[in-house]
Image (cartoon, grey):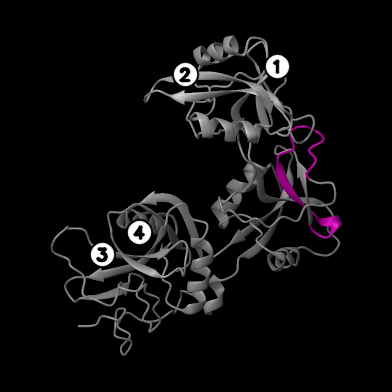
């Protein structure tokens, strides 16, 4: 029996339609921007936006920028926060170092404005440096879950080239978990300034999305003050972007959307519980327009599939949206959703997810897998 049906075989709307969910299919497609004329630090603004809306403004393209700018009257000239912030320090191998740092006095200060890589000085303290500078460097080999052996590479390279060398010949550039490892590297360096694996990679949006769109003003970002790591919209420069210190108090832009990608890995049931507690429910991609929006968000996920509010009933042998939408639209990948699911062997329920890459089609997965997921935020 072919099961190309979602909930009602498309003939009868058992659970109702889109009433109360979305007045138009396009309302999920675009972010709604809101200008908040209250002076807050970047972190305070982020908390406000997450409470009252979805998050600080993420701007993906020129169209988003234009809609953002229309929320402010033409005479407003102050700079206002958006959701872009310089990422925190991280290790090349993603090692968890339990917060150990050994910065030199007054570091990190980024006086040059582009010092995003870290070297150890001959006293064992850490200083920021331009990643394009050349230094000798320390690689490590991982011996087991708790042990490392360090190696001084006595030729000068940029930080990126040093990282590449270490990954080709050893495990990675050295991460430093504690004072003992720091002293060991210092002895090995023998008076040299050496690259270690700590770096600050790039700007990141508050909602953790990976949009590559940037609208920097000429000469920005330059970070002349040394610690300007939060981005603002420069209203007196046609909405171009600049740097500011994150603890300055400024107005800000929030965005709101009818659905949101959650960058947490959960089972389908836990994802649904999260959505129902914090938002409304798992999203229903019940039209081509909403599917396009889902695709755009799925591309930003950290898992190969993303949970939707799509579930299979073994009792009645069909797929349905948990929010109750009836629709003829479907986007199943070949071999998925069109055959009767086997409910008896694994004990896991069958639930629907969308592909992160490729054609972004729907697939049937056991509800015990742990994936990112998309919540709807409207009733």
Q: Residue at x 38, y 69 (%)?
A: 362
Tell whether label 2 touches label 3 (CB within 8 Å).
Answer: no
Q: Residue at x 46, y 70 (%)?
A: 359
Using residue 61 as the reference point, say whether residue 306 is left or right of it.
left
Q: Distance of mark 1 from mark 2, alpha carbons?
A: 28 Å
Label of residue 149 in the image: 2
Residue 163, image quadrant: top right
Q: Position of residue 264 (x, y in %)?
A: 43, 49
Q: Position of residue 56 (x, y in %)?
A: 62, 53
Q: Which residue is mark 4?
A: 272
Please tell me whether mark 4 sits on a helix, a strand or a loop.
helix
Q: Distance of mark 2 from mark 4, alpha carbons?
A: 45 Å
Q: Can you tell which of label 4 and label 1 is closer to the viewer?
A: 1
User: Which range of residues does the magenta coloring cover?
Assistant: 221-239
Q: Earlier in the sequence, mark 3 or mark 2?
A: 2
Label of residue 105 in the image: 1
Q: Residue at x 72, y 20 (%)?
A: 106
Q: Which residue is mark 3?
A: 350
Q: Position of residue 116 (x, y in %)?
A: 68, 34
Tell whether label 3 touches label 4 (CB within 8 Å).
Answer: no
Q: Earlier in the sequence, mark 4 or mark 3?
A: 4
Query: On screen, 131 above or below 258?
Result: above
Q: Position of residue 216 (x, y in %)?
A: 78, 52
Q: Examine the rendering and report whether any part of residue 108 can be seen.
A: no
Locate the N terminus by quadrant. bottom left
């Amino acid at each position: 029996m072919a099961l190309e049906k979602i909930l009602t075989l498309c003939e009868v709307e058992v659970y109702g339609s889109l009433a109360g969910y979305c007045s138009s299919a396009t309302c999920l497609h675009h972010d709604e921007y809101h200008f908040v004329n209250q002076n807050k630090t970047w972190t305070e603004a982020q908390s406000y936006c997450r409470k009252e809306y979805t998050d600080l403004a993420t701007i993906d393209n020129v169209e988003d920028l234009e809609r953002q700018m229309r929320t402010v009257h033409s005479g407003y000239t102050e700079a206002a926060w958006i959701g872009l912030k310089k990422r925190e320090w991280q290790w090349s191998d993603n090692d968890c170092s339990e917060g150990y740092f050994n910065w030199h006095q007054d570091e990190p200060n980024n006086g040059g404005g582009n010092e995003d890589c870290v070297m150890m000085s001959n006293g064992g303290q850490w200083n920021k440096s331009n990643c394009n500078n050349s230094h000798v460097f320390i690689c490590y080999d991982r011996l087991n879950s708790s042990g490392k052996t360090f190696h001084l590479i006595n030729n000068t390279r940029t930080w990126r080239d040093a990282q590449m060398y270490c990954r080709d010949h050893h495990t990675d550039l050295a991460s430093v978990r504690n004072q003992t490892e720091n002293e060991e590297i210092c002895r090995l360096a023998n008076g040299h300034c050496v690259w270690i694996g700590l770096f600050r990679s790039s700007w990141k949006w508050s909602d953790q999305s990976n949009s590559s769109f940037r609208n920097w003003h000429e000469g920005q970002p330059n970070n002349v003050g040394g610690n300007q790591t939060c981005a603002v919209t420069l209203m007196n420069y046609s909405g171009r972007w600049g740097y500011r210190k994150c603890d300055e108090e400024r107005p800000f832009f929030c965005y709101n959307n009818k659905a949101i990608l959650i960058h947490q890995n959960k089972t389908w049931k836990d994802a649904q519980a999260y959505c129902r507690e914090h938002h409304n429910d798992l999203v229903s991609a019940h039209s081509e327009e909403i599917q396009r929006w889902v695709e755009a968000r799925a591309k930003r996920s950290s898992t190969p599939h993303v949970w939707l509010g799509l579930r299979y009933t073994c009792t009645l042998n069909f797929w349905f949206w948990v929010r109750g939408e009836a629709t003829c639209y479907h986007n199943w990948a070949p071999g998925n959703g069109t055959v009767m699911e086997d409910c008896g062997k694994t004990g896991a329920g069958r639930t629907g997810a969308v592909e992160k890459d490729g054609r972004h089609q729907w697939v049937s997965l056991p509800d015990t897998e742990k994936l990112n997921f998309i919540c709807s935020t409207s009733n």
